[in-house]
């Protein structure tokens, strides 16, 4: 199903490529995003959906000196987030805190809690464990996986362990298993590797090249999704990682991002450099019953897995985030700095 957008828009001042759900904000549907201007001082925007769901409100606007390549909100403290940034000459990563009374200040300044300064290579991302309070962080650069001990009260992060993948691979990103605090997936040029954080050893791999983005299904253990540049989207059962259990066509150009819904276990979002966001309905995996709200699905015919294609964008879409608080809502971010929030309720049948 093709279509434009009935979504709610919000414009950033500069180009941007990353957005994150503020999961710890249980009172509002909020997102945080950051810009990527080479010449100007960059900005972090804290955006809130109005109570009526009709507009996006700038809850906070903060200066950030460098280009932001990755942003992630702390899952257990709504005022804390991480960024990966470029100075133009090198890459860095830091943990930031939004000031407590930021709404009452004329020009509130972010507080840098700590820097993740052990990296030598080009940093790709910082990962928070998505399933609750945890005193560890993961950061990934092109060569090395770092596990950090993070103490927010003392404002310190220390490397607990690290492991290099060697010269034959170049890491590009990853995801932390929400069902297992000791398991992480990292993407590299020729495969997706799975690591045990206790031993810092590789436990398994999916040998597929050009994977741009990965995500674990938060509702179903062992289900894992990959976005591949040219071959679309693959859904895997990690107990049998030799072949995917389902393949989705993806996008007409590169498939760049993929996100599993936090509540509806068959809903998947993808974004691409074809200036489109696609909403997919995955097949039921195995004999597991679909436990969430039922989705529009006819038992008498084969269902097109593409529920809807949101095409009202003028640039590549790099950023995607489902709302945890309202899991029928998602935010997308195109490179021209345009945030769009959409609701997928038309594709959920009544209880």
Image (cartoon, grey):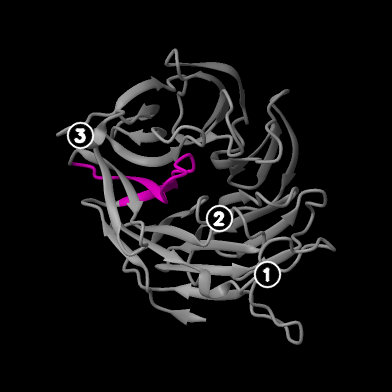
Binning the other alpha carbons within 10 Å of mark 1 as few (below 14), some (14 to 19) or many (20 upward) gives some
Q: Nearer the viewer, residue 199 or 325?
A: 325
Query: Which residue is pictured at 42% across the width and 20% down the height?
Result: 117
Of badges 2 and 3, the one in the foreground is: 3
Where disc 1 sits, the SS reads: loop
Residue holding disc 1: 294
Binning the other alpha carbons within 10 Å of mark 3 as few (below 14), some (14 to 19) or many (20 upward) gives few
Indicate the position of residue 302 as horizontal and vertical percent values: 72, 83
Q: Nearer the viewer, residue 220 or 169?
A: 220
Q: Earlier in the sequence, mark 2 or mark 3?
A: 3
Indicate the position of residue 209 as horizontal and vertical percent values: 62, 53
User: Is the C-beta separation of discs 3 and 1 under 8 Å?
Assistant: no
Q: Is residue 18 magenta?
A: yes
Indicate the position of residue 61 as horizontal and vertical percent values: 24, 41
Residue holding disc 2: 259
Q: Is residue 252 magenta?
A: no
The span from disc 2 to disc 3 (Cα, nearest Å) is: 35 Å
Give the extent of the magenta segment.
16-39
Q: Where 157 sits versus 54, above or below?
A: above
Q: Nearer the viewer, residue 186 or 282?
A: 282
The span from disc 3 to disc 1 (Cα, nearest Å) is: 44 Å
Left or right, 38 with respect to 54, comes to left
Residue holding disc 3: 104
Left or right, 71 with respect to 302, comes to left
Query: Which residue is pictured at 71% across the width and 36% down the height?
Result: 180
User: Is the C-beta separation of discs 2 and 3 under 8 Å?
Assistant: no
The span from disc 1 to disc 2 (Cα, nearest Å) is: 19 Å
């Amino acid at each position: 199903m093709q279509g434009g957008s009935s979504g709610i828009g919000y414009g950033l001042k500069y180009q941007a490529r990353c957005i994150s759900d503020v999961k710890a904000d249980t009172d509002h549907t909020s997102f945080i995003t950051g810009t990527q201007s080479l010449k100007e001082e960059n900005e972090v925007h804290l955006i809130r959906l109005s109570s009526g769901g009709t507009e996006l409100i700038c809850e906070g606007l903060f200066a950030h000196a460098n280009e932001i390549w990755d942003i992630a909100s702390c899952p257990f403290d709504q005022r804390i987030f991480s960024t990966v940034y470029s100075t133009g000459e090198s890459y860095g990563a830091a943990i930031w805190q939004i000031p407590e009374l930021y709404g009452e200040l004329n020009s509130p300044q972010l507080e840098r809690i700590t820097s993740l300064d052990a990296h030598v290579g080009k940093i790709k991302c910082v990962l928070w464990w998505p399933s609750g309070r945890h005193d560890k962080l993961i950061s990934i650069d092109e060569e090395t996986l770092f596990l950090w001990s993070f103490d927010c009260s003392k404002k310190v992060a220390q490397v607990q362990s690290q492991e290099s993948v060697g010269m034959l691979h170049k890491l590009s990103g990853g995801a932390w298993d929400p069902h297992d605090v000791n398991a992480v997936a990292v993407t590299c040029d020729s495969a997706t590797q799975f690591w045990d954080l206790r031993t810092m050893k590789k436990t398994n791999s999916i040998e597929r090249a050009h994977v741009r983005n990965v995500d674990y299904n938060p509702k179903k253990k062992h289900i894992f999704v990959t976005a591949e540049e040219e071959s679309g989207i693959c859904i895997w059962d990690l107990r049998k990682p030799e072949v995917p259990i389902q393949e989705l066509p993806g996008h007409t150009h590169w498939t760049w991002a993929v996100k599993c819904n936090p509540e509806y276990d068959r809903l998947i979002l993808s974004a691409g450099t074809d200036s489109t966001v696609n909403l997919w309905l995955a097949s039921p995996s195995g004999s597991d019953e679909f436990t969430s709200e039922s989705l529009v699905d006819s038992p008498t015919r084969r269902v097109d897995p593409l529920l809807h294609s949101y095409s009202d964008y003028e640039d590549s879409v790099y950023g995607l985030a489902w709302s945890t608080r309202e899991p029928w809502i998602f935010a997308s971010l195109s490179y021209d700095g345009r945030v769009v929030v959409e609701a997928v309720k038309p594709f959920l049948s009544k209880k």
